[in-house]
């Protein structure tokens, strides 16, 4: 099968979304699919050199890459950013779908505009939706009128908001983990370490890690070590600057600039993974955290902020919830989670590994 993956993302990047896209491509290629990735060279860091992308994302599989020109205002004009994004996304999608509409028999996209324009051409296309807006809902419902259009949603909140039901055209498919990197292999036993890995912000709003700083300090006195990982040095600087003067920064170990294999190894040295988010609608309704499945696949239990989307995740017995505004709540959750066992490997691999996920997507395309 030939598959053209068109996305308005940019690469390389440390974001969870870009990592997920490249992991999809890796596992599509493992299924002997001929994959062509098309994306805009929309900022200075954008690069479509295959070797550089493979090295950055630690991928061995080959695929075809087309980085397209982007003579549009988004990421070039520093005001009216929301409008510039919408305008640039729409225009880029129109021209790129017109150019590549005959490049393959199947398409996969993370872009609602690409989905809309390919659907107008009655092509075989799957759209994976990660958030909803009024405009996006209209485009999705219009596009689904094409008999060859399919939709992937992350959870039932999104399904309900669109007033749809699961069928052969619409499925719920949570995130999946890369089993080549995240597994129980070489796991350290009886650790007293907890870890958070990922961006400290979501859409420019803090996830709330700053509320836990004093708790991290008290956990150190209980001989529980905290590790925080972000590949954006600005995240770490933010947390250090906002910390109260009484905060002992030695109570937290910070890491940045790590490769995915190094992050996976850190997971294997820990007992508990932290899942935290802000109270925005995006965070409450439109998320299926990649790191959650990565934590579980490495044998970690999870402490999670009270969040509606978190409570739709599978394996709820492996999550202990806390109130991020109440210090003792987080400490009690960690103490409970750190002494619990987690052994979900077979079920995780069967239903939430990336190889399992892309097989479901391939079936949807067929």
Image (spheres, grey):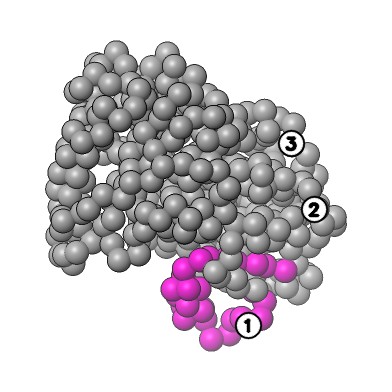
36 sits left or right of 269 in the view: left
For label 1, the residue is 248
At 33% from the left edge and 46% from the top edge, which residue is drawn?
Answer: 66
Q: Residue 51: within the magenta? A: no
Q: Nearer the viewer, mark 3 or mark 1?
A: 3
223 sits left or right of 230 in the view: right
For label 3, the residue is 344
Quarter the C terminus occupies: top left
Q: What element carries label 2?
A: loop
Nearer to me, 286 or 1:
1
Residues at marks 3 and 2, CA–CA distance in whole angstroms = 14 Å
The magenta stretch is 225-252
At 48% from the left edge and 46% from the top edge, which residue is drawn?
Answer: 22
Q: Is mark 1 on a helix, strand or loop?
A: loop
Q: Nearer the viewer, mark 3 or mark 2?
A: 2
For label 2, the residue is 187
Quarter the N terminus occupies: top left
Q: Is mark 3 on a helix, strand or loop?
A: loop
At 54% from the left edge and 69% from the top edge, which residue is drawn?
Answer: 257
Q: Position of residue 205 (x, y in %)?
A: 37, 60
């Amino acid at each position: 099968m030939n598959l053209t993956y068109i996305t308005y993302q940019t690469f390389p990047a440390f974001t969870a979304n870009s990592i997920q896209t490249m992991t999809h491509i890796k596992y599509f290629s493992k299924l002997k699919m001929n994959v062509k990735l098309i994306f805009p060279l929309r900022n200075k860091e954008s690069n479509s050199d295959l070797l550089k992308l493979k090295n950055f994302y630690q991928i061995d599989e080959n695929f075809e890459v087309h980085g397209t020109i982007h003579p549009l205002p988004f990421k070039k004009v520093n005001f009216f950013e929301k409008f510039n994004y919408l305008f640039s996304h729409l225009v880029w999608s129109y021209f790129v779908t017109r150019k590549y509409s005959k490049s393959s028999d199947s398409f996969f996209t993370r872009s609602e505009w690409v989905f809309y324009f390919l659907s107008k051409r009655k092509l075989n296309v799957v759209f994976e939706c990660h958030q909803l807006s009024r405009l996006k809902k209209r485009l999705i419902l219009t596009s689904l009128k094409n008999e060859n259009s399919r939709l992937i949603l992350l959870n039932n909140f999104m399904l309900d908001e669109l007033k749809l039901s699961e069928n052969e055209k619409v499925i719920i498919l949570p995130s999946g983990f890369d089993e080549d990197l995240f597994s129980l292999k070489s796991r350290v036993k009886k650790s007293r370490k907890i870890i958070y890995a990922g961006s400290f912000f979501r859409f420019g709003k803090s996830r709330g890690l700053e509320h836990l700083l004093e708790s991290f300090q008290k956990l150190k006195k209980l001989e529980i070590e905290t590790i925080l990982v972000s590949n954006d040095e600005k995240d770490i600087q933010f947390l250090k600057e906002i910390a109260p003067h009484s905060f002992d920064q030695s109570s937290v170990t910070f890491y940045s600039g790590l490769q995915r294999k190094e992050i996976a190894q850190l997971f294997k040295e820990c007992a508990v993974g932290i899942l935290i988010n802000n109270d925005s609608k995006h965070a409450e309704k439109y998320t299926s955290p990649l790191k959650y499945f990565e934590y579980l696949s490495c044998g970690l239990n999870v402490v999670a902020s009270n969040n509606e989307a978190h409570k739709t995740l599978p394996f709820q017995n492996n999550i202990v919830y806390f109130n991020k505004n109440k210090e003792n709540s987080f400490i009690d959750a960690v103490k409970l989670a750190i002494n619990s066992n987690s052994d979900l490997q077979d079920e995780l691999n069967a239903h939430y590994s990336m190889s399992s996920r892309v097989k479901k997507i391939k079936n949807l395309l067929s």
